[in-house]
Amino acid sequence: MNASLIWLIFRKELTDLFRDRKTVIGAFVIPIAVIPAIFFLVSVSMSGVEEDARANVSLVILGDVEQPLGQRLLQTEGVKRLQPDDPLASLHEGEVRAIVTIPDDLERHLRQNGSEQIRVRYDAANDKSVYAYDLIQRVIADYEQEVVAERLQAAGLEPSVIHPLELVEESVASEAKMTGKLLSGIVPLMLILSLATGGIAAATDLVAGEKERGTMEALISAPVPAGSILTAKLLTVMVMSGISSVAALVSSSLIIQVGPFSANDGGFALGFLGIGSILLLVLILLLLAAMFAGLELAISTWAKTFKEAQTYMTPVLFAAMVPSYMMLPLVPADIPLLYYVLPIFNGSALCKEIFFGEVQPLHVVCTLLSSLVYVAAVIWLAAALFRREKLLIH
Amino acid sequence: MIELDSVTKRFERLTAVERVSLQIQSGEVLGLLGENGAGKTTLMRMMATILTPTEGEIVINGFSVRHQQVEVRRQIGILFGGEIGLYNRLTARENIAYFGQLYGIAPDRLARRIEELSEMLEMQDYLDRRVGGFSRGMKQKVAIARVLVHDPQIVLLDEPTTGLDVGAASIFRALIRQMKAAGKTILFSSHHMGEIEKLCDRVAIMHCGRLCYEGTLPRLRAMYGFTDLDELFLQVLEKEGER
Ligand SMILES: Nc1ncnc2c1ncn2[C@@H]1O[C@H](COP(=O)(O)OP(=O)(O)O)[C@@H](O)[C@H]1O
Ligand SMILES: [Mg+2]
């Protein structure tokens, strides 16, 4: 191994790759354009549902609407009164969110210290209908409280007599943590996917491509140790992966900032991570990048042709995707220890902890050590394949 | 000087080169003849340390291909047949310079060497253009310049004239004569005899991995009594087939 030779080959590989539109598109355009686009579509459709649920609470109010409760419901923000021919059918179709029946002499009964039933029909399977039900419940509860207060006053009692306990609710999740929760799901997925995809074009080109074009033979006939060639190529693939994941990180951070999630945080989405977390994140991403690069180079070396290499790269994508998707619904507390030593799972799980702000030293040690083992194994494999004489068969 | 001593190369079951012994002196041009699949490329790859002999030894200017690979590689410039082996997205100059740097040539010497080669091969007009758009003949010239950039003592040319136009072929012949005069050892392979006649002092004919004739052209002619070289080549092969 010779540092200046590695540097020479590395520089040449990058120059060569950056002159290739395919590789540049693969490394930049996919993370910068496609990933945020997906992100955006998902979030827009998610918040679209929520917004619509808030803005259009179409209710059917049966009975005497002129009574105070009816008026309150109608004055609630977002509520619209519909009067379809068949309210129940409309509720099933989702056109009406809920049907409220107000008894005709509700007000009179209440004045006489009586009680009444208010029937609310809604569709528990429809999120928007559930939202409408919650809203109605709140309006009714508020109204009930007022009625109770009036009755107590009439009896010369304080409201606290029947409310000896008051619940004071306070979420300890800071805004940073809320952002982290959101990011901990999506960002590791995107980072790991872009690490895997970012290097594929380069790895395919750098060995299988060179073999096919005959330049590999020229390269290995020069007085350059095979280890230096492979190291330079490995670094090149890692750089392409790294660029790709940085692009994904920046673009998703921007999208979180300007997108529909922006209500959650004002500043740069990653601002909440401490320097230690960022360093750990960089370290684990480097290890993952090295592992993907080694794996992709091994595949590219093993393949007989460029086309064959491209075909064999597809499983790498799955190997990256499956663990990241499996990790998506989990919170750090739910992640089994085993995951911190399985390849790709480990990095994905640790990323999650970092974004959650709940990094556990044992998990860090497991992840880093197991990752090092995997990196060493794939690089050893790539080197063994690279030194075979079969390298030259095509 | 190249010394081959009973060199054999087997790929799994196939024996591509079998017990070939041969010596090529400095200042000599040897023509290596043989049909496709005869083992010419495999033999040259072993000389260039790209493949390791299964048996036997090859010594290049005193360095063993088994034990002194880096030294051997410094002695050798090898031009491959088949794919030309240039980086299409780099310019001609960048391609040549990259290999010059891999051989550790100092920058100013390298720049001078590239000028010299491009003048010799008449490629100044396209030296700074990307190789991707070149014709086969232009690429072949760049490849030759790349092979010669470190001024190797030993030049292995695997079917070098394939794809060269008439003009380029004559430039190429002049270059070989010049290298011969400079005392280089040159091995030149081909599957037809015509090219070899113009340049080579001696010929070696390979068939199915074995060396079946080795000697000067006049001696070959005397042995077989033919004057047409391609005819002669076929006769040797036929005789080899009978054995
Ligand atoms: N790397 C390899 N693996 C297996 N067989 C090979 C390899 N290289 C060459 N061969 C076989 O060895 C024989 C000689 O090939 P080669 O040296 O290329 O012949 P030539 O250059 O004279 O056409 C052929 O049968 C070829 O298929
Ligand atoms: Mg050949």
Image (cartoon, rainbow, N blue to C red):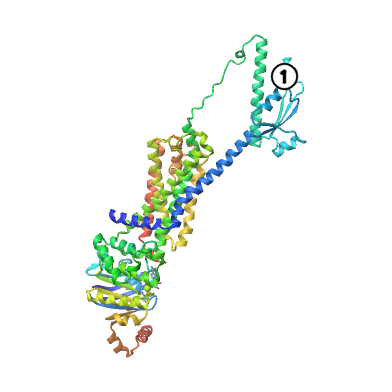
Q: Quadrant of residue B227?
A: bottom left
Residue designated by label 1: A115
Ligand 2 lies in quarter:
bottom left
- How busy is the neighbourhood of tag 1: few (under 14 within 10 Å), some, or many (20 plus)? few
Snapshot quadrant of residue A114: top right
**Residue B43 x, y percent position in the rendering:** 32, 72
Residue A345 visible in this rendered orientation of the protein:
no
Residue B39 lies, with reference to residue A13, above or below; the image says below
Residue A351 seen by the camera: yes
How many numbered discs?
Answer: 1
Is the CB–ligand 1 distance for label 1 below 8 Å? no
Pinpoint residue A219: horizontal percent, then vertical percent. 33, 63
- Left/right of residue A205 with respect to residue A70 in the rendered view: left
At a point 37% along the width and 66% down the height, the residue shown is B85
Question: Considering only vertical position in the picture, is A293 above or below B42?
Answer: above
Q: Quadrant of the C terminus of chain A?
A: bottom left
Q: Nearer the viewer, residue B190 or A50?
A: A50
Left of B230 or right of it: where is A248? right
Q: Please report, as a chain letter, where disc 1 is located.
A: A
- As drawn, is B112 to the left or to the right of A19? left
Q: Where is residue B7 in the image (x, y as percent from the top left)?
A: 30, 72
Q: Furthest-top residue in view? A: A156
Residue in the foreground of this view, choosing between B238 and A315? A315
> Which is more toward the observer, B93 or B1?
B93
Give amino acid for label 1.
Ser
- Which quadrant is home to the N terminus of chain A? bottom left
Residue A20 vertical position relative to residue B42 in the rendered view, above or below = above
Percent x, y of residue A71: 70, 24
Residue in the image at 75% along x and 17% along y? A108
Name the element at disc 1: loop
Q: In which quarter of the image is residue B237?
A: bottom left
